[in-house]
Amino acid sequence: SRVVCTTWRALHPRHCKPSVRMIALEDTVQVKHIDREGKKFDKVSRLDCRSENYDIEFVIDVNTDLYPVKLNEKMSVALATSLQAGVPDPGTYMPNAGDSLLDQYDYAMYGKVYKWVEEKEKSSNAVSIYVSFGGLLMMVRGDPRHLKDLQPDGRVYLLMRKV
């Protein structure tokens, strides 16, 4: 269900019914490969990760100059549609908006789902979702039941911290 609020009310959560689900997916992942196809950029690495609880595959471009990552390292990863509990994402960063999911993570990116592909194979019930973070990319592949909150053209936050 969605919160029906004016823009002003969306920015002031006490005036809205808090029914917006902000975390679409949260799991611990392990880095299985770094730059499997070779390093393309000096400060960016492509991480191949596998989640522990939902058996989801992640391929994530990360600015390793800002957030260094090691092979076999474990991280908590969250995909969120909003940073504030019960408040739809306003589309702009508001640093003084109060408590935020950003406070719980070390690395964050904000992007847009640009491709959503449902696999047609009978042996596989999976969906692949592609997100662009202004040039850095992510692909998430797994059971559509766990990825249903990530919709085509939707905005999403990728949040990471080391475990």
Image (cartoon, rainbow, N blue to C red):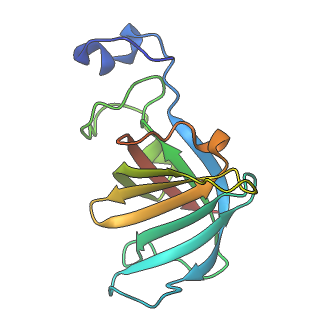
**What residue is at 64 percent from the left and 52 percent from the top?**
126
Relative to 115, is 37 above or below?
A: below
Describe residue 122's horizontal placement relative to residue 92 as left or right: right
Taking depth in this image into account, of 161 and 34 the one nearest to the observer is 34
Looking at the figure, which quarter contains the C terminus?
A: bottom right
Numbered disc total: 0
Residue 34's x, y, as percent?
A: 54, 82
Quick check: 120 left or right of 85? right
**In this view of the protein, which residue sits in the foreground, 151 or 118?**
118
Identify the residue shown where x is 23% and y is 15%.
8
Residue 51 in the figure: left or right of residue 6: right
Decide which of 119, 59 is in the foreground and name it.
Answer: 119
Q: Is residue 71 above or below residue 153?
A: below
Residue toward you, 78 or 133: 133
* Occupied quadrant, residue 131: bottom left
Answer above or below: position of 81 versus 17.
below
Q: Position of residue 57 (x, y in %)?
A: 62, 63
Residue 154: x percent and y percent? 37, 40
41 left or right of 39 in image: left
Q: Is residue 105 above or below residue 87?
A: below
Across and down, in percent, residue 105 comes to 50, 53
What residue is shown at x 26% (from left), y 12% (from top)? 6
Image point (24%, 18%), residue name: 7
